[in-house]
Image (spheres, helix red, strand yellow):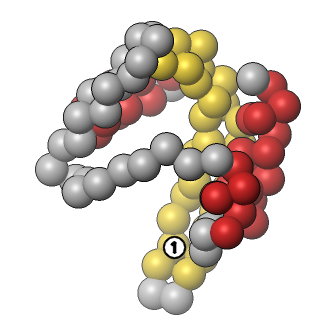
């Protein structure tokens, strides 16, 4: 549910978000790893969001769509990000 997603984002990043939209759910495989990717489009409540990571992460960065395309991302992730850009 969107309430669970909001709570997870708040716990892991310190961000409060609004207007959550489920974009896609994909099964993803890599060597020795299988996961379910759940993609949401959402917007920070604050005009200048301040990320505060919890113990599960050590760093973050904001990226452009072009930068994300250069990463070793799942193809579905790139497709969803491009779709989200159109919805902004």
Q: Residue at x 42, y 11 (%)?
A: 46
Residue 12 appears in the picture as rendered: yes
The image quarter in which residue 72 lies: bottom right
| Above or below for 10 versus 47 | below
Specify the quadrant that holds the C terminus: top right
How many numbered marks, from 0 up? 1
Residue drawn at the location 32% of the way across and 26% of the way down: 50
Is 20 or 2 nearer to us in this picture?
20
Residue, disc 1: 34
Give the residue displayed 67% in from the left and 69% down from the top: 70
Is residue 49 shown left or right of residue 88?
A: left
Q: Position of residue 57 (x, y in %)?
A: 25, 54
* Residue projecting furthest to the left: 55
Where residue 18 sits in the image (x, y, percent)?
Answer: 52, 13
Q: Nearer the viewer, residue 27 or 8?
A: 8
Instruction: Estimate the x, y position of residue 2 in percent, counting from the top left.
Output: 51, 22
Q: Is residue 3 left or right of residue 8?
A: right
- Secondary structure beneath dot 1 equals strand
- Check the image and name the residue furthest to the bottom: 31
Looking at the image, which is closer to me, 5 or 85?
85
Can residue 4 be seen in this snapshot?
no
* Neighbours of disc 1 within 10 Å: few (<14), some (14-19), many (20+): few
Q: Residue at x 37, y 32 (%)?
A: 9
Vertical placement of residue 3 versus 37, above or below: above
Please, is residue 47 above or below residue 52 in the view? Answer: above
Which residue is nearer to you in this view: 83 or 61?
Answer: 61
Task: Where is residue 26? Give x, y as percent.
Answer: 67, 56
């Amino acid at each position: 549910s969107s309430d669970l997603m909001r709570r997870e984002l708040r716990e892991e990043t310190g961000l409060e978000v609004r207007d959550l939209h489920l974009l896609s759910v994909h099964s993803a495989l890599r060597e020795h790893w299988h996961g379910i990717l759940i993609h949401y489009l959402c917007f920070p409540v604050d005009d200048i969001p301040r990320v505060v990571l919890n113990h599960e992460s050590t760093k973050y960065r904001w990226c452009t769509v072009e930068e994300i395309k250069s990463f070793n991302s799942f193809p579905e992730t790139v497709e969803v990000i491009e779709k989200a850009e159109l919805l902004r």
